[in-house]
Amino acid sequence: MQFWLMKSEPDVFSLDDLEKAPGQRSMWDGVRNYQARNYMRDQMKTGDRAFFYYSNHDPAGIWGVVEIIGPAYPDPTQFDPTSKYFDPKSREDNPRWMLIDVRFLYRFPQPVTRDAMKNNPQLDGMLVMRPGNRLSITPVEPKHWYVIHKMAGFTPERK
DNA sequence: GCCAACGTTGGC
DNA sequence: GCCAACGTTGGC
């Protein structure tokens, strides 16, 4: 099992939205970056877990955890001319953009803000904290995963 | 709202 | 295949 961090603007899609979705499950659509796509297509597996990170939000930070439901399949919004994620260059017989589903797992007792993450030396080197990083999906090292859970006042269940 | 970082596009 | 222009991301 691997750990990830997935960014979302909560005005667009929040952890609340996911929790209220049918089956507490949703497509992670709209990713239009090749490296993030490759993570979803090639590396993310059912049972992997990901931090749900709020970007463009005050405060930015991590609100909870979701489960990855794989395998990846074509993102339908790329073929929808009314979608803001429409990609006229993508063809149905050779889709450019893939996605995975995510399922709500749990909310942190208290969110871990970006500010708090920045001030914790145990998180030095975490990819999402690197200046200028814009990648919306990044792998998370297990040690960082556990440090952030501790900061959230949350002790993960065994396993 | 500003703007630095950085990915993508397209002219050549 | 270079690289300037452009658009987007996202912290601040």
Image (cartoon, coloured by chain):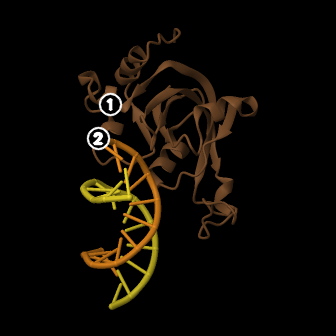
Chain colours: A brown, B yellow, C orange
**Picture residue at 36% right of the left edge, 18% below the top:** A147
Name above or below for residue A2 compared with residue C11: above
Choose top left, top right, bottom left or bottom right for residue B7. bottom left
Tell me what residue is drawn at x 47 percent, y 10 percent: A155
Q: Nearer the viewer, residue A97 or A148?
A: A148
Q: Are marks 1 and 2 in contact (CB under 8 Å)?
A: no
User: Which amino acid is tagged 2?
Assistant: Arg
Q: Which residue is mark 2?
A: A130
Q: Position of residue A156 (x, y in %)?
A: 50, 12
Badge 1: chain ID = A
In the rendered structure, the answer to whether residue A137 lies left or right of residue A30 reads left
Whichever of labels 1 and 2 marks the residue nearer the N terminus, that label is 1
Nearest the eye: A54 or A26: A54
One can see residue A13 in this view: yes
A122 left or right of A88? left
Judging depth in this view, the residue of A72 and A128 nearest the camera is A128
Disc 1 is placed on an element classified as: helix
Q: Which corner quadrant of the image does residue A22 belong to? A: top right
Q: Amino acid at mark 1?
A: Asp
Q: Helix, strand or loop at disc 2?
A: loop
Q: Is residue A2 visible?
A: no
Residue drawn at point x = 58 percent, y = 36 percent: A14
In the rendered image, the residue lying farthest to the right is A22
Is A136 rendered above or below residue A50?
A: below
Residue A144 spot, x, y in % from top left: 35, 24
Q: Where does the image place residue A120, in percent across and percent down from the top left?
A: 27, 23
Numbered tag placed on residue A115 in the rendering: 1
